[in-house]
Amino acid sequence: MNFNSHTDTVVRMAVALVNVLTPGEDRSRAYLPPEGAERTTALSALFRASGSRRDVTSAEAAAFVPVAADLRVVFAAVAAGDLDGAAQQVNDMLAATGAHPVLKRHDGEAWHIHFHSADETSAVADWAAGCATGLAVVLGGELHDRLGVCTAPHCDRVYVDTSRNGTRRYCSTSCQNRVKTAAFRARSSSDMGAH
Ligand SMILES: [Zn+2]
C-alpha cells in the first residue's frame, strides 16, 4: 500500500492487537484471549517484533484490552459497510487519546512521523493514538475498504488487505483453504447427486 512505513506499522499493530486480545472465533475454533502472564508475554513479543526495546508490563498488557475492543469496532463497521460508524469510532479514539503527529529523527534515520497521545508518559495511550491514526489514514484514503473481518465460517479475526487488487476476504491462508475445500466438497457431492 502507499502508506509510509510508520503507518504500515501501526495498522499492522491494530490488526495484531484485535486478533490477540478480543474473544470470538479463530479459524473454526472458539478463541479466548490470553490473560495474566501469558498475555504480557504475547504482547511483549508483538511489540518487540515491531521494534520496541523493552517488554510490556502486566499493567500495560491489561490496559491494551479495551484498546483492542475499540479497534475491533472499526474493522467490524467497515466489514458491515458502515463507513460512517467506522469513521465515528476512529474520531472518538483520536479525541480520547489526543492523538497528534510528531516529526522525529533518530538512529540515523531520515525525519519521519511518529504518532503520539496527549499523555506522553503512557506507551499504551501512544499506541492507541498511533493505531487510531493509522486507521484514520486508511479510512480517509482510496483504500478505505481494505479493513476486514474474516468471512470464513466460524472465524472473526481481522485483517488489512494489502493486496494489489484488494480482493482479500480471509484472515489467513488457513481460512482461505478451509473455504475452498468446503466449496470443492459441496461441488463434488452435488455432481454425484446428478449422476
Ligand atoms: Zn479466518
Image (tube, helix red, strand yellow):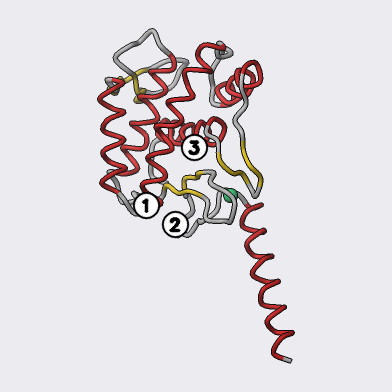
Residue at disc 3, secondary structure: helix
Q: Nearer the viewer, residue 79 or 100?
A: 79
Give the side of residue 8 with respect to residue 97, left or right.
right
* Dot 3 amino acid type: Val
Q: Is mark 3 within 8 Å of ligand 1?
A: no
Identify residue for label 3: 15
Q: Could you say which disc has been placed on residue 145 in the image?
A: 1
Q: In the displayed image of the protein, which residue is found farthest to the top?
A: 121
| Mark 1 closeness class: few <14, some 14–19, many ≥20 residues within 10 Å | some
Residue 102 found in image quarter: top left
Real-space Cα separation, disc 1 to disc 3, in angstroms: 15 Å
Real-space Cα separation, disc 2 to disc 1, in angstroms: 8 Å
Residue at disc 2, secondary structure: loop
State which tag comes first along the sequence, 2 or 1.
1
Q: In the displayed image of the protein, which residue is found farthest to the bottom?
A: 195
Q: Could you say which disc has been placed on residue 166 in the image?
A: 2
* Dot 2 amino acid type: Gly
Q: Nearer the viewer, residue 36 or 87?
A: 36
* Dot 1 amino acid type: Asp
Give the side of residue 47 with respect to residue 75, left or right.
right
* Residue found 61% across the figure and 22% down from its top: 35
| Mark 2 closeness class: few <14, some 14–19, many ≥20 residues within 10 Å | few
- The x, y position of residue 169, in whole percent, is 51, 56
18 over 104 or under it: above or below: below
Q: Mark 3 or mark 2, which is nearer to you?
A: 3
Q: Could you say which disc has been placed on residue 178 in the image?
A: none
- The x, y position of residue 162, in whole percent, is 47, 49
Q: Is mark 1 within 8 Å of ligand 1?
A: no
